[in-house]
Image (cartoon, rainbow, N blue to C red):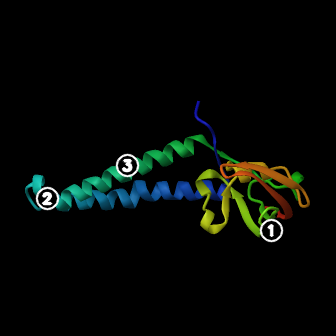
Amino acid sequence: MAQDVLLSQSGYDKLVKELEFLKGPERQRIAENIREAKSHGDLRENAMYHEAKLNQTRLESRIAELERTLQRARIVEVDEAKAGTVQMGSTVKVKDLDLMDVFSFTLVGEYEADPDQDMISIQSPLGAAMVGHEAGDEVEVDAPAGLLQYRILDVRDPA
């Protein structure tokens, strides 16, 4: 059985919007490119046609991936009863107890994760270890780099 894909409501809405765009305007644009390329004659040596068909294949693959993801999506609601506790959507400020670095991140679903934007998957080793803890807790994370230790300095609840 396929595993649920955890998403925030905004993450789910973003994927739905992308799917609608790909199935509508983007699919039409690529179909038009294929029609135009066909009008140029011999398809065997028509680079424009082959590129358009490759783009169509990529588009249809992405559409299928999004549809599978949305079918398995489970929207994680913010639990107001757990205010001050790390949960999906929380912004967490931690101190690495080995390196003494302080950094913040927001816990999001797997498809929303973007480490460059400090958005960490709730299913990652760091994210999963933080869930349910609160400011002041020390948390051990069994990561690929080894056992890491953090102190939670602050938890901001999801908006």
Q: Decide: marks 3, 2 in contact (CB < 8 A)?
A: no
Of the numbered discs 3 and 1, the one sitting upstream in the chain is 3
Q: Quadrant of residue 94 in the image?
A: bottom right
3D distance between C-alphas at marks 2 and 1: 59 Å
Q: Mark 1 points at which residue?
A: 100
Query: In the figure, 48 relative to 74: above or below?
Result: below
* Residue in the picture at 25% in, 58% down: 52
Q: In which quarter of the image is the N terminus?
A: top right
* Along the viewing direction, whichever of 85 and 99 lies nearer the viewer: 99
* Residue in the picture at 80% in, 56% down: 149
**In this picture, residue 74 sits left or right of residue 101:** left
Q: How crowded is mark 3: few (under 14 residues within 10 Å), some or many (20 or more)?
A: some
* Spot occupied by residue 44 in the image (x, y as percentages of width and height): 11, 52
* Along the viewing direction, whichever of 25 and 41 lies nearer the viewer: 41
3D distance between C-alphas at marks 3 and 2: 21 Å
* Residue in the picture at 88% in, 57% down: 134
The amino acid sitting under disc 3 is: Glu
Q: Name the residue under label 2.
A: 46
Under circle 1, the secondary element is: loop
Q: Name the residue under label 3.
A: 60
The amino acid sitting under disc 2 is: Asn
Q: Quadrant of residue 99 in the image?
A: bottom right
